[in-house]
Image (cartoon, rainbow, N blue to C red):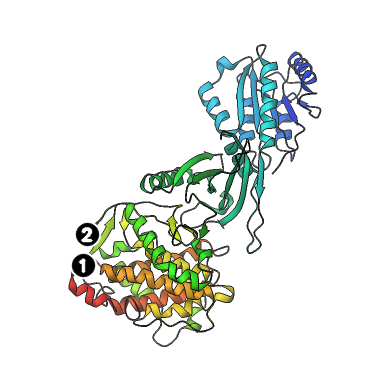
Amino acid sequence: MSYPRKLQILVVEDEQPPIDGYQVVFGALRDRFPHADPVYVRSYADARVQIESPRHFHVIILDLNLPIANRDNPEDGLAPGESLLEMLAQRDAYPVPVVLVVSGRLSGANLPNLRLRLARDFWHGEFVNKGSTEAEEIRRAFEKAHEYCDVGVHIRSSPDRWYPTLSPREDDLLRRCVLTQTQCLGVDLEWWGAEEGPSLTRPPAECGPTSVLMGHFLLDGGLGTSIPTFFKFEPAANAPFVCRDTSVLAHKLGHVKLYHADASRTRCLLVTQSVTNRGRPTPLSEFLRGDPTRVTPALPGIVGDVVTQLGHLGDATEVRVPLREVLWKYLNRDQVEAAWARTGVTEHLKAGESSPMYVFDQLAKNTAQIWVRRRACIHGDLNATNVAVDPDHQDRPQAYIFDAAGMNPDLDLRDLATLEVTTLLFNSHGPDQKLLPTCRQFYQDGILPAAIFIPDDATPLIRNTVHLIAEIRKRVSASGDGTNYALVVFNAVLMQLFGLTVQPSRNKITHPLHASLLASWAALWLRKLAPDLATSSKQPIVPPSSPEANSRTVG
């Protein structure tokens, strides 16, 4: 969204003397602030027509005490004007950057509430008492409108993938963010990722997608650009949660810094800096598509970085919990089974493969107490787009986790399982449809296959992903916590399968069939590793740190 610099003005005022005064002020400012002839409306009804029209306005001067219709007497109180102010705040298709509330009855208004609304919903909002400083406030309002228009917003094309455009409200939040920075002229951005529609944790589709762009602030005075910066747009309802999670992550990890947060009625913007202090970071999902001769040797270090940073989020302690609590509490059995059936997976199952629902049912009613390692705080959404890789960091590529979601106490293995499962299901498309079949070997007997097989015609993504999972499994095997890892992997696959019922289209899973296949494999794998878990036994399972558990879970 970009408004022309020539100002468009709407005046909502029912009395002629103030209108005459505005005309004098506008005339005096025309040379310095070129503007079109202002639109004057004298009632609530006419003002509403203008506000609901597809017309942009830079500056709106609003009287709160108005008649409902032309030729009527003004209403008692300020309700008509306050209602119009609310409409302006919700004008997402044509955001208004500057609003002046002008009234001779401000003493009767709820000033703290109105002041909060002006500060929250507009780039510049002010109260003005009639007959006092209107001329100076209008001049300042025009300056603020030009500041808003002068922000440079440059978004690069993404030739390898289609992304949604920024909405006018998102552009508004971005401009307001730039204007809060010192020595800042604009932003230079490129897409990092986007998720459209509802999900397991986000509001409905009409609240807008989650979009992430990466780039730099453009600095004034010949200072060039800022360090790499992430700009994340979410539904406004998520603002308290994403701000809280980012704040926690910033306290725990030195490379994350919460830089700016703002919200309108429908959208919120979260800005973080310092994922890296060097050049452009690369999403792990993109890094895995690189030359295997360079990427594969770097994966042990990258997985090590991820594990170390997850460890910084909170101490892990061994506790006993009911086995069924390992399953995500919102999983709906009927919906999971419906998603399974909808993919037509039964035609693709091989001998011995079956529905995962038997294992799910047994786990759901298993009252056994099992030993787990619970971390005080986990990342909550560790997929390959939430791991940034600095490919030029000193002697080897360095990984940084960021963009957490749902940072709560949970099993310490949950994040690694989520990373494994989402990497498989989100990247299995196009020429990489063989990714999932190639990784079938990780869901057969042990935690880590004795020998790893990679087809000669495998793409770089397939080769690198196989080695990524192998490195994750090496970490799990060394921890002696293989049984619990199989449990959380099974749970992670069911969550993705369940997600297909919430978001059947526009899902990151290109092939829903693959989610069903992986669910079947994970169920069989879990039954082989721990046949006693997939029963309704009330006997406690041996702690994962015991020699018995190690010998049973490591292949």
| Residue ID at (56%, 29%) | 119
- In the displayed structure, would residue 341 be above or below residue 33? below
| Residue ID at (56%, 20%) | 109
User: Is residue 422 toward the left or the right of residue 109 in the image?
Assistant: left
Q: Amino acid at mark 2?
A: Glu
Q: Secondary structure at mark 1?
A: loop
| Residue ID at (40%, 56%) | 380
User: Is residue 176 toward the left or the right of residue 299 in the image?
Assistant: right
Q: Amino acid at mark 1?
A: Ser
Residue 8 vs residue 393, the one in the foreground: 393
- The answer to which quarter of the image holds residue 401 is bottom left
Q: Residue furthest front?
A: 395
**Circles 1 and 2: CB distance less than 8 Å?**
yes
Residue 305 vs residue 518, the one in the foreground: 305
Residue 256 vs residue 502, the one in the foreground: 256
What crowding class fits label 2: few (fewer than 14 Cα within 10 Å), some (14-19), or many (20 or more)?
A: some
Of the 4 image quadrants, the one containing the C terminus is: bottom left
Q: Picture coordinates of residue 108 (x, y %)?
A: 56, 16
User: Is residue 164 toward the left or the right of residue 477 in the image?
Assistant: right
Q: Picture coordinates of residue 410 (x, y %)?
A: 32, 56
- The answer to which quarter of the image holds residue 223 is top right
Q: CA distance from mark 1 to mark 2?
A: 9 Å
Q: Picture coordinates of residue 142 (x, y %)?
A: 70, 26
What crowding class fits label 1: few (fewer than 14 Cα within 10 Å), some (14-19), or many (20 or more)?
A: some
Residue position for label 1: 545
Whichever of labels 1 and 2 marks the residue nearer the N terminus, that label is 2
- In the displayed structure, would residue 458 be above or below residue 21? below
Q: Picture coordinates of residue 58 (x, y %)?
A: 71, 32
Q: Which mark is residue 318?
A: 2
